[in-house]
Image: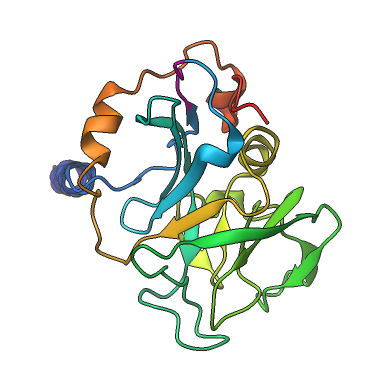
Amino acid sequence: MKKILAFLLLGCLVIGANAQMVEAGLATTKQDKAVLYQVPGNIEKKNTFIVISKKEQRLYVYGKTAAGETVLMAKFPVCLSKNKGQKQRKGDMKTPSSPKGKPFYISMIQDASTWRHDFKDGRGNIKAYGHWFLRLVTPGHSGIGIHGSTNNEDSVPGRASEGCIRLRDQDIITLKEKFAYVKMPVNIKDEDEGPWEWEPAVHKKAVPIKSNAKCAEGGATSAGPVD
């Protein structure tokens, strides 16, 4: 009987904790998937941008229509730095936040399929970046980018990187093929920063694309913006 009561109590605690985290808007489970959304008309790539929420552990792709309306195009769960807070120096295991109104941007899109890294955890020099590395210009810091999570997919969503932004391997392919381009603005919010004023209304209007079989496995399928 004691074992049963202990099990029930543990279950209540887990459910309660998950409820609090969901209410806070956090990506709390490993089942969090990439989603693509229906987009009215064609949106040029040059009119798209990224917003990364440390609080929610998600990357959002937004676009502006010809009429000037901002729409949600995609969202991806992400893994961010082990340590919280603004990046101060190399090796502090923190993801930098971009200054308000001054987003970072993609400077290079590099094939990282053969890249390796030693996490000093006993696994040795292993593949770790997925197929693509979207290198970011982050003034004051170097080596920060958006990439895959080969051999570390269980870390997405979560906090486990050395400072970069990890996506699942299929998701970095989708992001690169459908949305990313050199000079694409990338906004990274502060740790406890919630939705920007315009985001709730945009999310409320967003309609997920249902025929995205790959999305159910962490990827996504749909037409992205036009070049």
Could you say which is closer to the camera, residue 208 or residue 106? 106
In percent of the image, x 82 and y 52: which residue is there? 113
Could you say which is closer to the camera, residue 201 or residue 192? 201
Q: Give the answer, above or below, for where 86 lies relative to 200.
A: below
- Residue 116 in picture, x, y percent from top left: 80, 66
Q: Give the answer, above or below, for where 145 lies relative to 195.
A: below
Give yes or no for residue 143 being in the magenta stretch: no
Viewed as shown, does residue 140 lie left or right of 9? right
Query: Which quarter shows the C terminus?
Result: top right
In percent of the image, x 45 and y 23: which residue is there? 37
Viewed as shown, does residue 69 lie left or right of 222? left
Viewed as shown, does residue 31 lie left or right of 166? left
- Residue 224 in picture, x, y percent from top left: 60, 26
- Residue 15 in picture, x, y percent from top left: 20, 41
In percent of the image, x 34 and y 46: which residue is there? 28
In percent of the image, x 60 and y 49: which residue is there? 153
